[in-house]
Amino acid sequence: MKKYLLSLFVIVSVSAFSQGFLHRNGQNIVDGNNKNILLRGLGIGGWMVQEGYMLQTQSFASPQYQIKSRIEDLIGPVDTEKFYAAYKDNGVTKRDIDSLAAWGFNSIRLPMHYNLYTPSIQEEKKGQITWLEEGFVRTDSLLNWCAANKIYLILDLHATPGGQGKDAAISDYDDSKPSLWEHAANQEKMIALWKKLAARYKDNSWIGGYDIINEPNWNFSGTNKNGCDETLNAPLRALMVAITKAIREVDTNHIIFIEGNCWGNNYNGIFPLWDENMVLSFHKYWNYNTQGSIQKMLDYRTQYNVPIWLGESGENSNVWFKEAITLVESNAIGWAFWPMKKIENIAGITSVTKNSEYDLLLQYWKNGGKKPTAIFAKKALMQLAENYKMDQVTIKYDVIDAMFRQVQTNATKAYKKHVLPGIINATDYDLGTNTFAYFDKDIANYKVDTGTFEEWNKGKALRNDGVDILPCTDINSNGFQVSFIENGEWLQYTVDLENQNTFDVAIRYSNKNTAAKLYLETDEGLKTPSISLPETGGETLWKTVVLPSISLKKGTTKIKVVFETGGINLSSLEFVKSQK
């Protein structure tokens, strides 16, 4: 009887455990209960694979090996390893994953560097493949934190042995060494790595799947160096088939995500598919969020009866984020945005502070001059590593709001609590999208379709909407101002009043050459007369004009500041009880 009960317990346990595996069901990703799962994820880029633009080194050191070389030149190899250990220790912790879960993410895409799991072929003895513990241990910890939060972890080989594309920063590609496509040993190592990972995680249902090669961008027979005009992609398909075969020898549970050439989007020659539990991934950046922008992938989904997934996107405005997520979710497509942490990151969910000492290192690396001492450089870099802790970064609640709440509603909400009487900083306008929380004429970067890079926030500061924000010299400000204001643009503020009152509104502004006009209006139908804002004589010369006798009712009111004529910098509005 005991033996029977034990056997029954094992059967029930295995059955219950297996229900958690994500898998393909026709054109959908489902869990073990065949419930559709819409992945809402984040790619934690910059952690295992550094890219120069995230560290502001892109103009002189873009792939990681170049960045590391610069650091070693300043502080030596031993302290360089100490920096990288601290950087990775702080870059992703349990607190980070707890935060992502609280904000609404149900999945994480882990961009992996192969060299944390296995040495380069140049470091191996002939024909040998050995293993390193660091990558596996860090992945184990991350997986445990994900499981505790019921978050799926998708493993993404972002930097392959030798590098999979000529866009060097993405894969840490060093063109002085053979690429993934130019040496069989690199491909053999990659296949072995995936088999090793699959064997390790085959029974873990919180692994969402294996994204086996990130953004290949290589010309095999075409003329475009990034593989965008390839018609066959035979080497890419052959490698992905070989990797799949190796994975399936040890793991039949997990989804295999594949990507086309040309940064994931050129699927010419990749079909027919070769596995029953497969998902097509595509990447989307800087184009219009129209049905046509994803139609090719939708056609693949239908033609090949396979799920599709927006495996990477981001680096744009909140308006673009809302548009893109609304588009894909309305077509039952999950997503993973990019990245999590970046220095002075306006377009991500967190921003890492750039300490002044690190800025001096950047200036030296870029311009030369007197070399910083090893002591100074180590202190600068270790402080930077400290700044990557979740309790040190700036959380971008406006970005999170755009990715989740704004996708569901056009309703606006207060960015900060404003109780009148009191000062409202110009940059503290409501959370919400363009034409609802504010109106600005430049709202997103659509450069792929327009051919022109478009700044949505020309000051690249504080918030990620279309509103242009710059640092501010006004002593009465919060350190920031709204600038580049055009005719007809407006900002909305949600305010609370304990009692009905009449206020005089003191407007703090500056402008150099152009007089401006604005007025206020409320959601209760009040519209004030326009008030003129004469020239102050300079962008940093601040003056105050008063709009008198504005009556507001008790409770919550939404107030718009409408710029009838733009051209000013706006610092703040102070609501003072009228004495008349």
Image: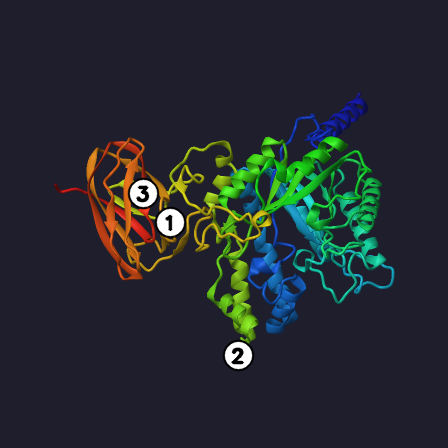
Distance from the alpha carbon under mark 2 to that under mark 1? 44 Å
Quarter of the figure with residue 491: top left
- Give above or below for 338 relative to 502: below
Given residues 72 and 542, the one toward you in this image is: 542
Mark closest to the chain's N terminus, 2 or 1: 2
- Give above or below for 574 relative to 80: above
Asked whether the beta carbons under mark 2 and mark 3 sit within 8 Å of each other, the answer is no
Q: Secondary structure at mark 2?
A: loop
The residue that mark 1 highlights is 486
- Give above or below for 162 relative to 439: below
The residue that mark 3 highlights is 561
Quarter of the figure with residue 69: bottom right
Mark closest to the chain's N terminus, 2 or 3: 2
The residue that mark 2 highlights is 370
**Where is residue 572 shown, x and y percent of the image?**
30, 50
Q: How many residues crowd mark 3 within 10 Å: few (<14), some (14–19), many (20+)? A: some
Amino acid type shown at disc 3: Val
Distance from the alpha carbon under mark 2 to that under mark 3? 50 Å
Amino acid type shown at disc 2: Lys
Q: How many residues crowd mark 2 within 10 Å: few (<14), some (14–19), many (20+)? A: few
Q: Which mark is residue 224?
A: none
**Where is residue 87 shown, x and y percent of the image?**
59, 58
Q: Secondary structure at mark 1?
A: loop
- Give above or below for 439 relative to 67: above
